[in-house]
Image (spheres, rainbow, N blue to C red):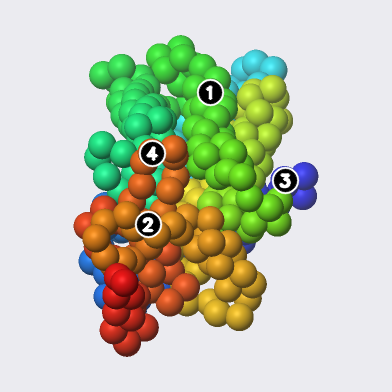
Amino acid sequence: MSGSMFYEKAGHNLAAAIALPILDAGVVALRVYTRRKQRLPLQVDDWLIFVALILVIGACAASIVGVSLHGLGYPTPEPKGPPPAGNRPGLLLTLPEIVIATKIEYALQILTIPALGLVKLSVLFFFHRIFCPQKTANTKSRYAILFMMALVILWMVGYWMSAIFICGNDFGAFFGNTKGLKEKCGDVLLWLYTLAITDLVTDLGVLVLPLPLLWKLQIAMRKKIAISVVFALGSVATIASAVRLINISKYYRAGFGPQGNLNSTITGVIYWTLIEVGIGLFAACLPTIRFLFKGMGLNSTVKSLRQTFSVTSTSGERRGRIGTLESGTVGKAEWKGEEVRLESMRVGVFRGEEPASPPQKG
């Protein structure tokens, strides 16, 4: 075990499986508290995060069970009696620890793939609510976001179904030895590798989606940077996705670990999967809960948003502000302290005071 990496050890996996649900549950609770403090109803992006949180908790619970049963966090034990013949005897082992590890891995893939997809969709619905408050407005932005939503849904459903039927209808083949796994289920490490690659690609797509719209605005560079920071908080999840890809690529190049150490390989894959989905969910909540953290550089950011997206309404009276996101397409803005939301039907200044009366026409 001395040659194992930290993410292949029981202690680190147990710590991640305990800390991530607590961290995510806390940030989701802050998300709900933020909505209540703003007196806003829960939106689609909030409900998607709730479902993702349940899946993350389930995945972390499965990991804890795997560690407690010595299926995760420990190298494949030496067989009792003479080892199987061959240069890599670990490939032929069918031990209780291997069965436990493969069952936990199977369960985690089924739980974490939809969790990752729902987190991405939550961020996209947030962007849609901000940039497309009216169904007939912001056509280019709307189509771009809807296209990305469709891509994420296809990715999520496709990989989720392939995870369930990775061995066809021979579900028990996944829980046997490595030799049987390769023969009946194909190259599982290649499947994990492509999953990690496409996961990172979709993360990057979600991350950069709002930036072109913001950066084409004719405003000062410092304002562009300030506004971009608000929507780029999800880069934390993208970094976690990249780290996961790097580590899975190592397993892919090396095969099933030294001396066919299947348990260590599975443990490493599970560790980085939990890290990514846990951090991804946390990052998806940051733009919403930023309203709670005053005095941390957010005032200037929101001022930039307000100055950028505010123009005078051309209707008979001045009922609020409207945010111009594209030429000829506007949506009314709703201000709640430091929170900015662009909605088509709601407008006002929510600081416990009535909005000022519109000036009388002379």
For disc 2, the marked residue is: 322
Q: Residue at x 29, y 79 (%)?
A: 357
Q: Residue at x 70, y 25 (%)?
A: 254
Residue 28 in percent (x, y) is at 39, 66
Indicate which disc residue 159 carries. Answer: none
Secondary structure type for disc 2: strand
The relative height of residue 315 versus residue 194 in the rendered view (above or below) is below
**Mark 1 and mark 2: Cα distance apart in space:** 43 Å
Residue 191 in percent (x, y) is at 50, 22
Residue 323 in percent (x, y) is at 41, 54
- Sequence-wise first label, 2 or 3: 3
Neighbours of disc 4 within 10 Å: few (<14), some (14-19), many (20+): few
Q: Residue at x 68, y 53 (%)?
A: 220
For disc 3, the marked residue is: 4
- Sequence-wise first label, 4 or 3: 3
Q: Among all residues in the image, which is located at the extreme bottom?
A: 352
For disc 4, the marked residue is: 328
* Quadrant of the drawing holding the C terminus: bottom left
**Mark 2 and mark 3: Cα distance apart in space:** 57 Å
Q: Which one is closest to the eye, mark 1 or mark 2?
A: 2
Residue 15 in percent (x, y) is at 57, 64
Q: Amino acid at mark 3?
A: Ser
Q: Residue at x 59, y 39 (%)?
A: 216
The relative height of residue 353 versus residue 206 in the rendered view (above or below) is below
Q: Are marks 4 and 3 in contact (CB under 8 Å)?
A: no
Indicate which disc residue 194 carries. Answer: 1
Determine if residue 324 is in view.
yes
Secondary structure type for disc 1: helix
Neighbours of disc 2 within 10 Å: few (<14), some (14-19), many (20+): many
